Image (cartoon, rainbow, N blue to C red):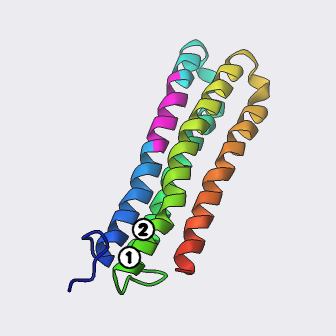
Amino acid sequence: MQDTVLGISGQGWAYLGAALAYGLAGIGSAIGIGLVGRVANGVLAEDPNKFGSLLLLTALPGTQGFYGFITAAIILFGIFGRPENAAQGFQIFTASLPIAIAGFLSAIYQGMVCAAGAGMIAKRPEEVGKAIVLGVFVETYAVLGLIASILLLIFK
């Protein structure tokens, strides 16, 4: 009898988890950056001197993709162990879900918050700090997703 869960081997579940962690977090980051980038480009068309302030706001939603990549690397390199059977592989898969889901959603919502911040900078450039702080609040949940995934991988 083959050792599988739903017809997928332990290594297969681990690879699927790694792909999901990076894929969803990366897609969320791309969407989030796109949301901010559109507004930032409009602001820059009017005032190119605001590039520095807008660059940071545009980059913020990209961090979730890095968190997903870190989780995927931890899984692929077997840093906390490789699956010995399908059940352990499924545990690795489920451990990837916090950063996959939190990374995907928080990147999109962070993009929305940062896009609004870019609009604020267009009218009140001295308020860039407030725009960044509000964007970072959303980041907190991506960091928590990363920590949860790492803890689940450690204690699988």
Q: Is residue 77 visible?
A: no
Residue plotted at (65% across, 59% down): 144
- From the viewer's side, name the closer residue of 106 and 125: 106
Three-letter amino acid code of the residue under disc 1: Gly
- Is residue 113 toward the left or the right of residue 68 in the image? right
Task: Based on the picture, tell me whether residue 30 belongs to the magenta stretch.
Answer: yes
Where is residue 11? Give x, y as percent.
31, 76
Element class at badge 1: helix
Residue plotted at (45% across, 60% down): 69
Instruction: Give the labeled residue for mark 2.
Output: 93
Q: Which quadrant, please, contains the N terminus?
A: bottom left
Where is residue 134? Give x, y as percent.
73, 37
Residue plotted at (58% across, 44% down): 106
Gap between marks 1 and 2 measured at Cα: 6 Å
- Give the magenta range: 28-38
- From the viewer's side, name the closer residue of 96 and 76: 96
Task: Identify whether 141 is placed above or below 30.
Answer: below
Where is residue 30? Give x, y as percent.
44, 40
Residue 51 is labelled as none
Give the residue at the far top of this rendering: 46
- From the viewer's side, name the closer residue of 50 and 32: 32
Three-letter amino acid code of the residue under disc 2: Phe
Instruction: Give the labeled residue for mark 1.
Output: 89
Q: Residues within 10 Å of mark 2 (few under 14, many from 20)?
A: many
For the residues labelled 1 and 2, say whether their Cβ atoms are less than 8 Å apart: yes
Element class at badge 2: helix
